[in-house]
Image (tube, rainbow, N blue to C red):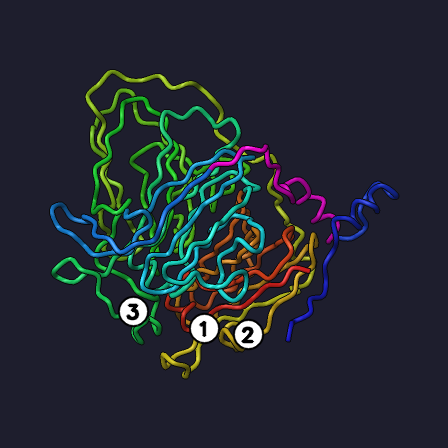
């Protein structure tokens, strides 16, 4: 059964009315006028194909020097290969499953054709051991994205299956360097092997599986060398099962320029931004050309006890003088201050109950996955969605196939200058978001804490 939605306005209707009267006569249509042009509805392939090929395989990597940890890995590496293409190019990946269980690849945040979304039972069948599958799509939006399995995610992500997809503008900004940091969090035993009890009752009933070994790009507290004067684009991706990161870059001149892949309408202060599983944050960092210090520690401050993620050291070389250019900014991100004047037309209530195969089921609107009732949204229409967290746990909620904008937190208007595909809903918190779906299909919506999703916190949003 599907939940029919009420109040909405359509972009086509709005355009026709504007032509006739010159001004919209409803709040919904005014909200749509703010949205129009924010991002494209269709991809614009330029005819160039970029081919990749790799397999998911059992492997061993050095999280610590001279110590091998058994993992599952794309191309035998953790993280897997960083795939880079330019906007307009078509990505084609021949993927082979060499694992002992089925898997898929989901392209997190990328507005892909429905059949390429990697959700078993919804968009494709699981890829069985020994089989291959070809993913092919042309991204519609430049930005920072990543890929990971959508089968037994609580185990497969924890074992190391993830990688970055970077979609660069046709003419990228001339940064000195473009770096990717994939943050992860491992639960390792004393012998440096992964604790192989997945989806435990303790993890499900709390905030998922938090580990004891955070890493950056598969290394414990790595040191990154930079040159004086460099201007760096740093792309942060949280690939952890459950850990929230709050990296502190206050020691450097860091400016937020994009969130969840999408460029912001204006620069923003990244201080205090919490990166939940699935979130991405792009920073514009200028290294001092005459530094008084040559070492900067990047510290995580989400938990009571802070810890170092990585160390940045400035090389003793002559300063470089990067080309000058403006901080990247999106042409259009609506404010949507009037969204409170339209009613909530869809709600996701987040809570839990006893039962199910794990003893606890996490619910959306009172139902676990397989018993779910899909939510229906109208294509190219304005919707006000509400997440209501009735539990005392954290829930990063991710909607496939679309971007949305946070409008209120607990009834208070917020003005984030960027879109999202994942929002962290804190305990007992209510968040309203605005969304105009441009891609038709059945799109999975779920908590990105893998253990909560495994225990039922998933549903479908159908765009019609």
Q: Is residue 270 part of the magenta span, yes or no?
A: no
Q: For label 3, count other residues whose C-alpha is less than 10 Å away and answer few (under 14), some (14-19) or many (20+).
A: some
Identify the residue under disc 1.
456
- Residue drawn at 50 percent across, 31 percent down: 328
* Disc on the earlier residue, 2 or 3: 3
Q: Position of residue 367 (x, y in %)?
A: 52, 77
- The residue at 40%/37% (across/down) is 283
| Picture coordinates of residue 271, whole percent (x, y) | 38, 43
Q: Farthest front residue?
A: 130
Residue 380 located left or right of residue 60: right
Query: Mark 1 Cα within 10 Å, few/some/many (few <14, many 20+)?
Result: many
Question: SS at mark 1?
Answer: loop
Asked if the residue at tag 3 contacts the one at tag 2, i.e. Cβ–Cβ closer than 8 Å, the answer is no
Describe the element under mark 2 as helix, strand or loop.
loop
Q: CA distance from mark 2 to mark 3?
A: 24 Å
**In the rendered view, would you say 266 is above or below 289?**
below
User: Which is nearer the eye, 33 or 360?
Assistant: 360
| Residue bearing the label numbered 2 | 372
Query: Which residue is at the front of the view, 425 or 94?
Result: 94
Is the residue 422 above or below the residue 38 in the image?
A: below
Query: Can residue 449 be spotted in the picture?
Result: no
User: In what element is the residue under mark 3?
Assistant: loop
Q: Residue at x 20, y 28 (%)?
A: 294
Q: Does residue 121 appear in the picture of this structure?
A: yes
Q: Quadrant of residue 254?
A: top left
- Front position in the image: 461 or 227: 461
In primary-sequence order, the first of circles 3 and 1 is 3
The answer to whether mark 3 and mark 1 are in CB contact below 8 A is no
* Numbered label attached to residue 198: 3
Task: State which region is magenta.
Answer: 27-50
Which quadrant of the figure contains the C terminus? bottom right
Horizontal side of 370 relative to 448 (left or right) equals right
């Amino acid at each position: 059964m599907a939940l029919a939605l009420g109040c909405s306005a359509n972009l086509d209707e709005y355009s026709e009315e504007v032509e006739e009267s010159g001004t919209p006569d409803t709040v919904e249509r005014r909200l749509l006028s703010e949205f129009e042009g924010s991002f494209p509805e269709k991809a614009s392939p330029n005819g160039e194909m970029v081919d990749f090929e790799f397999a998911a395989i059992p492997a061993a990597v050095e999280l610590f020097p001279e110590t091998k940890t058994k993992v599952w890995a794309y191309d035998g590496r953790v993280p897997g290969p960083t795939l880079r293409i330019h906007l307009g190019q078509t990505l084609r990946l021949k993927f082979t499953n060499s694992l002992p269980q089925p898997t898929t690849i989901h392209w997190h945040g990328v507005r892909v054709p429905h059949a390429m979304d990697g959700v078993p039972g919804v968009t494709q069948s699981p890829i069985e051991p020994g089989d291959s599958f070809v993913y092919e799509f042309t991204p519609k939006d430049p930005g920072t994205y990543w890929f990971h399995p959508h089968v037994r995610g609580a185990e497969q992500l924890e074992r190391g299956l993830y990688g970055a997809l970077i979609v660069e503008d046709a003419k990228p900004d001339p940064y000195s360097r473009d770096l990717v940091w994939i943050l992860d969090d491992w639960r390792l035993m004393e012998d440096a092997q992964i604790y192989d009890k997945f989806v435990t009752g303790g993890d499900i009933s709390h905030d998922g599986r938090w580990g004891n070994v955070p890493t950056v790009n598969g290394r414990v507290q790595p040191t990154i060398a930079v040159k004086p004067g460099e201007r760096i684009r740093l792309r942060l991706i949280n690939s952890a099962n459950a850990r929230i990161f709050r990296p502190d870059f206050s020691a450097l001149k860091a400016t937020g320029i994009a969130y969840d892949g999408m460029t912001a309408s204006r620069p923003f202060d990244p201080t205090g931004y919490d990166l939940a599983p699935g979130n991405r944050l792009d920073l514009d960092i200028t290294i001092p050309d005459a530094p008084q210090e040559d070492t900067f520690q990047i510290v995580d401050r989400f938990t009571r006890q802070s810890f170092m993620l990585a160390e940045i050291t400035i090389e003793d070389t002559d300063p470089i003088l990067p080309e000058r250019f403006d901080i990247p900014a999106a042409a259009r991100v609506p404010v949507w201050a009037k969204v409170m004047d339209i009613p909530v037309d869809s709600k996701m209530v987040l809570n839990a109950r006893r039962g199910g195969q794990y003893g606890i089921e996490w619910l959306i609107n009172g139902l676990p996955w397989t018993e779910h009732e899909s939510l229906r949204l109208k294509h190219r229409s304005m919707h006000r969605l509400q997440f209501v967290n009735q539990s005392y746990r954290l829930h990063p909620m991710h909607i496939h196939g679309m971007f949305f904008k946070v409008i209120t937190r607990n009834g208070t208007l917020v003005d984030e200058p960027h879109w999202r595909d994942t929002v962290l809903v804190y305990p007992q918190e209510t968040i309203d978001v605005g969304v105009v779906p441009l891609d038709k299909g059945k799109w999975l919506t779920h908590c990105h804490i893998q253990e909560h999703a495994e225990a039922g916190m998933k549903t479908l949003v159908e765009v019609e």
